[in-house]
Image: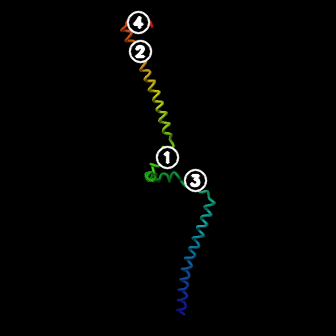
Amino acid sequence: MRRGVTGLSERGDRWVTESADQFKTLVASVAVRLVDLVLDELDLNALVRERVDIDALAADLDIEAVINRVDLIALADRVIEGVDLPAIIRESTNSMTAEVMTDVRTQGERADDVVSGIVDRMLGRDRDSR
């Protein structure tokens, strides 16, 4: 009888072990499907806004680590692509050219007045009679 009980007990243990593995697999499969169904029904963005303190998360961020993960060269290239650099250079050059020309004309007029004054004095002309 003991041999029979021992044999049955061993068979029972094997069956429980094998069945437990199959049961775990079945439960895991059902759980994954159930979670997928629940997630499909939820608005995760609204849930995060309602339940997560984003400021607290942001405060805990390691900004240096985030920056180190960013490809700064690619980012700079994208920024430069978005800027019309030739137009900016052209505009600033036109503006500078106009300012320089105005300054040159003004200085030319002043120089002309000085030269005219010197010539008038040399020739004995009265400037007020003009």
Instruction: Choose the circle earlier in sequence order: 4 or 2.
Output: 2
* Spatial separation of the CA atoms under disc 4 and disc 3: 86 Å
Residue most extreme to the right: 41
* Spatial separation of the CA atoms under disc 3 and disc 1: 31 Å
* Spatial separation of the CA atoms under disc 4 and disc 2: 14 Å
Q: Name the residue under label 2.
A: 113
Q: Nearer the viewer, mark 3 or mark 2?
A: 2
Q: Which of 97 and 27 is in front in this view?
A: 97
Assign the N terminus to one quadrant of the image: bottom right
Q: Which amino acid does label 3 sit on?
A: Arg
Residue at x 62% of width, y 64% of height: 37
Instruction: Choose the circle earlier in sequence order: 1 or 2.
Output: 1
Residue most extreme to the left: 122
Q: What residue type is labelled 2?
A: Asp
Q: Name the residue under label 4.
A: 126
Q: Where is residue 35 in the image (x, y as percent from the top left)?
A: 59, 65
* Spatial separation of the CA atoms under disc 1 and disc 4: 68 Å
Q: Which amino acid does label 4 sit on?
A: Asp
Q: Mark 1 points at which residue?
A: 78
Q: Name the residue under label 3.
A: 49
Residue most extreme to the bottom: 1
Residue 30 drawn above or below residue 17 = above
Instruction: Choose the circle earlier in sequence order: 1 or 4.
Output: 1
